[in-house]
Image (cartoon, rainbow, N blue to C red):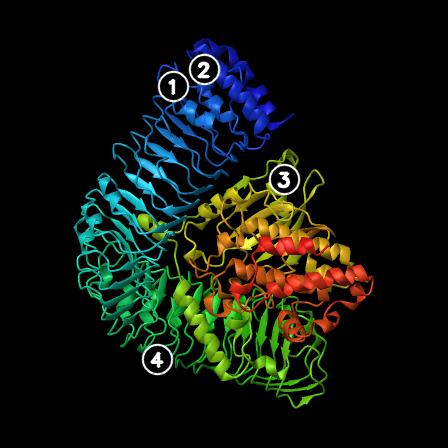
Amino acid sequence: MSRYENVSFTLSFFFFFQLVFSQLPSKQIATMTNLYEMLQNNSGNSSFRWSNAKKDSNPCSWVGVSCSSSNSSVTELSLPLFSISSSEILPVICQIDSLESLDISNNHLSSIPDVFVSSCGGISGLKLLNISRNELGGSLPTFNGFQKLEVLDLSRNSLMGNINLQFDGLDSLKSLNLSYNKFTGPLPINLGKNNLLQELQLSTNGFQGEIPVGLVKYGNLSLIDLSHNELSGLIPERFGELSKLQILVLSGSNLRGEIPKLLVKIQTLFRFAANQNNFVGNIPPGITTYLRNLDLSFNNLSGTIPQDLLSPPNLLSVDLSSNLLEGPIPTEISLSLFRLRLGGNLLNGTVSFRSYGNLTKLTYLELDNNSLTGEIPPELGLCRSLALLNLAQNRLTGVLPVQLGNLANLQVLYLQKNKLVGVIPHQFTQLHSLQRMNFSSNSIGGSIPASISKLQNLTNLDLRHNNLSGPIPISIRTLNLLLELQLGNNQLSGDVPAMPSSLQIALNLSNNLFGGPIPVSLSGLIALEVLDLSNNKFSGVIPNFLTEMAGLTQLVLSNNQLSGDIPKFKQYVTVVTGGNKGLNQAPSNAPPASSKKKRTVSVGVVIGAAVAAALAAGLLTLIVISISRRYYRVNDMHLQSEEAASEQQVILGNLLTANGIHRSNIDFMKAMEAVANNSNIILKTKFSTYYKTVMPSGANYLVKKLTWSDKIFQLGNHERFGEELEVIGKLSNSNVMIPLAYVLTVDSAYLFYDFAPKGTLFDLLHGNSESALHWASRYSIAIGVAQGLTFLHGCPSGSILLLDLSSKSILLKSLNEPQIGDIELCKVIDPSKSTGSLSTVAGSVGYIPPEYAYTMRVTMPGNVYSFGVLLLELLTGKPAVSQGTELAKWVLSNSAQQNKWDNILDFSVIKTSLAVRSQMLAVLKVALACVSASPEGRPKMKSVLRMVLNAR
């Protein structure tokens, strides 16, 4: 018996009572009965939400159905998340001529039939129509009729084309939302005959041209959102005439010119966001007189910050980061301010505010990457709500104020690249909420306080390039959440203590005074990616346990006193051992001397740094600083409330799949029991841990755990991620791992998938398999991954880019059924809006396109490059990094003469037949095009798929 039959059976005895008291006309009862049956047939019994419905009962009692006060007519239908895919249901709904509100959002509708427009357009009282978050494609219909329609929401679909007169006949339109579609052409200005429009949301489309002055005719406008289009030109001066405007969002376009002074006169305007444009000139004085939220970041604004800019009493948030502003920071600060971001400018003078003790709401203070001087004000310790304090890369002097230890809510403290001296105050170890602490590149001396063990929430600790001395405290092993420990370039000595087993990103002890054997306690760091012990006095042999560290991708042992034989490491591990005179041989996978030149590396390796000469380390530092400056973002949607400063502690969960078998098999409690047991781990990647779970029914599933490692920059992310998963869960492609369900906790996300019994492509290609994978399977895998990636790039709900496409993120249901994993990571880690962890942005070593080293912007051409490396893996049988050399670079250097291409291909496969050889050579041409150094030179995935298919 299905879930819905159970519900109907349970409530059936209410039928007679409800029927007696129902006063709905027989026609509406018949229509609702018909609608019931159609929904049950067309929704796939998946997200059918009439949980208290029975087709013979009173429809006014069904969830999502509202009737008039006398129950004489149906007035509202709300059917979101019903998995409706057939447009045939729409004309049936329109037979309810008393409807005032219709919400069919979050379904699978692909079109709006003409009969729906003609029939629903004739409903005289319909005021709200919401078809958002569906799969609508094609061009807009013309909305004839709909005389009373006030709210129309078509957002988050794939509608396209120009907008001309499709809305011109709507007499009563007050709110229009077309965001997240694919519209092009000029911005529309014909939006209702009577110019009653109050809310206009057109963000994230492809609209072009200038902002039309004609929008001013809608004098009642209170909300305008034109962000993330391809606009140009100026903000019309006449926008100052919109006397009721409350929110104006123009972010992420190519707008230029100066900020219009007339905006200052709009007394109702409380949010103005024009970040990520090309605005120049000075910030108009008085612009924040009435504002609560101002975001002008990532422009080319110059001059000084107006002295009155930060002082208006209603001001909540100001972001002027990454401009060309100079001069001092105003001293008068609004007592309501909770976010102040001024990083990445040319500001000078001291950090000096009045009334520090009254800044009780200040939560985020970012003044990094300026030219500020003087000492860190001890009075900052009075700002008790501070969760983020970033004063990095200035010219600050003096000691670390002990008063900062009073900031009980502080989660991130960045003071790197200043001229600070003194010692680390023991009071800092009272910062029990602290997650990230970076004091690198200063002149701080003394020892690391033993009481650092009190910082139990610490995930990243960077004390590089200081004058620290003495031993590393033994208590450091108790920091059970620590992912990264950077202690290089100090004067530390003594024994290396046991480290937290949680270390994953990097352990850097380079350029210190450590000696003796490499400690066996390091063997417990099974997830560690980068270990740098270079430029110390370690002696003895290189221990074999280092070869068994499963997560290791880079090991730097150069310039020590090591001796003996070098053990054999996995091929994908880069091992650097130069400068150890006692070693008997070069490691089989050591990088050649030329590899010390500029090369593409993972961001985890960037964080590890200190791998080559000081010049390379300096270059990597500049890259990291540049990345941090450009992409150190917080979702600005949370600026609309003071409550944005407090993290939402929530636990969410939901079934996504429409498959009744999965829905009956998946048991959340059983799955959570499985992930609590490490023996169920079958795969660990940089981003995720995969568990095998056996449900009570005996069915096997994969549960993937994602850890929220950057909570301070992900405020509200649980709700947003849950919403995105609802969208992703509606996708359907056999070559993409689509989540079947999810559970979100405060610290983690758990995603459920079909079980993949063949493991990862990496294991299949480079594991201990006795026989090589034959070409037919390799070719099928290549086609499958290409089909999946093409689908993701052209996804109806918006292109999905992969942060980490590698052979470890391809799971196999069979030798011919590859599935692309980690598609949801772009919803967790967005380099343009979140700091994320720098090790979780650019992907895996060997798959990263060269341009990522300086742009750090994930792109479609970047995904194509990664796919090209996958093809090369399938063709050569070699991993993406072998003997310290990236596969793509090795292939490119050996492909100049086409008559020698046979030497590139896997000999055990190419020798099988001439037909196989011919096909492999054809695919090699595709791979070489994909790994072109120029992003513009790479084909789009649609073309790549066609070329791979044509290689048959």
Which is closer to the viewer, label 2 or label 4?
A: 2
Marks 1 and 4 sit apart, C-alpha to C-alpha, by 72 Å
Q: Residues within 10 Å of mark 1 (few under 14, many from 20)?
A: some
Amino acid carrying label 3: it is Ile
Amino acid carrying label 1: it is Ser
Q: Earlier in the sequence, mark 3 or mark 1?
A: 1
Q: Say if mark 1 contacts mark 4, CB within 8 Å.
A: no
- Label 3 belongs to which residue? 666
- Label 4 belongs to which residue? 419
Which is closer to the viewer, label 2 or label 3?
A: 2
Marks 3 and 4 sit apart, C-alpha to C-alpha, by 56 Å
Q: Residues within 10 Å of mark 3 (few under 14, many from 20)?
A: many
Residue 432's image quarter? bottom left
Q: Residue 468 at what x, y percent from top left?
A: 45, 81
- Label 2 belongs to which residue? 28
Q: Say if mark 2 contacts mark 1, CB within 8 Å.
A: yes
Q: Is residue 789 visible?
A: yes
Query: Number of callouts in the render?
Result: 4
Marks 2 and 3 sit apart, C-alpha to C-alpha, by 38 Å
Quadrant where the image shows the C terminus = bottom right
Q: Residue 380 at what x, y percent from top left?
A: 28, 66
- Furthest toward the top, the residue is 20
Q: Residue 899 at what x, y percent from top left?
A: 73, 72
